[in-house]
Image (cartoon, rainbow, N blue to C red):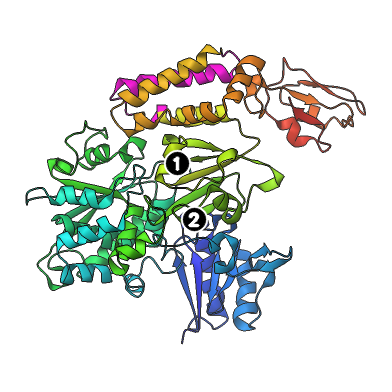
Amino acid sequence: MIRTHVLICGGTGCTSSGSVKIREAMETELAAAGLAEEVKIVLTGCFGLCANGPIMIVYPEGTFYSRVTVEDVKEIVNEHFLKGRVVSRLVHKEEAEDGQIKEKALSETMFYKKQKRVALRNCGVIDPENIEEYIGTDGYQALGKVLTEMTPQEVIDVIKASGLRGRGGAGFPTGNKWQFAANQPKGKKYVCCNGDEGDPGAFMDRSILEGDPHALLEAMIIAGYAIGSDEGYIYVRAEYPIAVHRLEVAIKQAREYGLLGNNIFGTDFNFDIHLRLGAGAFVCGEETALMTSIEGKRGEPRPRPPFPAIKGLFGKPSILNNVETYANIPQIILNGADWFTAMGTEKSKGTKVFALGGKITNTGLVEVPMGTTLREIIEDIGGGIPNGKKFKAAQTGGPSGGCIPASLIDTPIDYDNLLAIGSMMGSGGLIVMDEDTCMVDIAKFFLEFTVDESCGKCVPCRIGTVRLLEILNKITSGNGELEDLDRLEELCNYIKSGSLCGLGQTAPNPVLSTLRYFRDEYVAHIVDKKCPAHVCKDLMQYKIDADKCRGCTACARKCPVNAIEGSVKNPHVIDPAKCIKCGACVATCKFDAIYKD
């Protein structure tokens, strides 16, 4: 008889840290201890707290082990499962309000206290490759309700009343999109899912696909019923092998259980889903480019109108939502529109999933009600900035978004507030930056990405972004002029207004937002020929503090170009003409005598 369940994170992050090997080692140790029939191991999706992975939760106690290694498994089996003694050194610990370091259950950590899990409700809870575990958490009940108790229009009306907006970036009302497609004449229609997720640092959709794939399937079937479609396509990037595998398993299981195919739930409704793998082109996150790619053509956007709801995939009426948007649908159907509208703000209902990364203590996946402030996400959930550094900015929306300065840290995060301050929600990437970040360099980083990912179909994006990058390179190399700032703004506005699709229309956002809030850094690069954050190599020098230098010669011996001179026990000097600014000397010096100027 099973008396203990061990949940091990099987998301991409923990898998890369060895969670599959941990499971294998635990199976071996449990068999050796004679406990194989009493302890069940479940490989789940992402728990969210990626900074402390691999994560293991033991039930019914709820013991939260973090940063577990293969070497720890034998001790856990012998101490916890055989002797009933928790392995304290592996239990997640957190500083309490009284300053004491205390052991915390997963739900009691600051990381989880302010979260509200809707889209992520099953991630880290169930075995994503077992359809019965999904059914055991009310899975496919919403579909049963829809097919046996509701008309297609009633389904759309519930989604409209919920105020659900697309979680892929634009924030278009989901119910309205479905209504447009439903209004088209009867005939072939398609339901599409965008699982491409190309933003740097974003992994929200991937984690849902890895942790709760049946939620997506159920939602797409519901959408098919609502608009009068019998066929759907999931477009997911091939770089997500775990997500692809679990989707394949889920689709096969759903067909075996009669939840995909003909006469679903004994009705006359038929629906099936196909999987299509993308090659990683960022532009294929745009709906028309994605559909063009599914059709087997080069992924390029098409002019709109006509919009996909009228003429989409294979020229037929189609809807496209991203994974997170769909993940909300079954819960809205089961709990009602009022339940969903009770969360969030007036114009942004429900919750939003963010991939929290960068200079933050608790990197990972978080889901919070719309309207949660940036401060709550960074300081409370994220645990603040590590190493005593100051918060400088947060970048939301990926390459399409903007940088939010520290002065706006109390901004409630929703669609309209972010647009008002020059950023956007995007798919949910949230990159935190500290005082050591150069904002000009950040703008250049995102622009390099969009230049590389532009499909090249329209001139404003193909040529304009390259010209923007040339100006930024000129500024960061110390050759900028104040007139370049006016050129940047003018060019940004041309690109935004003239580009064919959302990639080009939003590509200038990182430049415009950093110019708006960090113009002084641009001026410092141009006028003072200095990078205040000491990041831009052409505007930086490595120097040695003579008072701190002990003349140990370690830095001189490490320098690959012999740019450091000096004798034993005497202060050394760096020759700026020879220095290639590789940083090897800084990493070598034990006396903190070398600094950037």
The outermost residue toward the right is 569
Residue 48: x percent and y percent? 50, 58
Residue furthest to the front: 346
Could you say which quadrant of the image residue 122 lies in?
A: bottom left
Q: Is residue 462 magenta?
A: yes
Mark 1 surroundings: few (<14), some (14-19) or many (≥20) residues within 10 A? many
Residue 442 spot, x, y in % from top left: 54, 31
Percent from the top left, x then y, of residue 455? 32, 29
Amino acid type assigned to the residue bearing label 1 in the image: Leu
Q: Is residue 514 visible?
A: yes
Q: Residue furthest bottom?
A: 1
Q: Which mark is residue 366?
A: 2
Which comes sooner in the sequence, label 2 or label 1? 2
Q: Residue at x 63, y 82 (%)?
A: 84
Per the model, the C-alpha gap separating discs 2 and 1 is: 18 Å
Q: Let me know if residue 235 appears in the view.
A: no
From the viewer's perspective, is 264 left or right of 485? left
Numbered badge on residue 418: 1
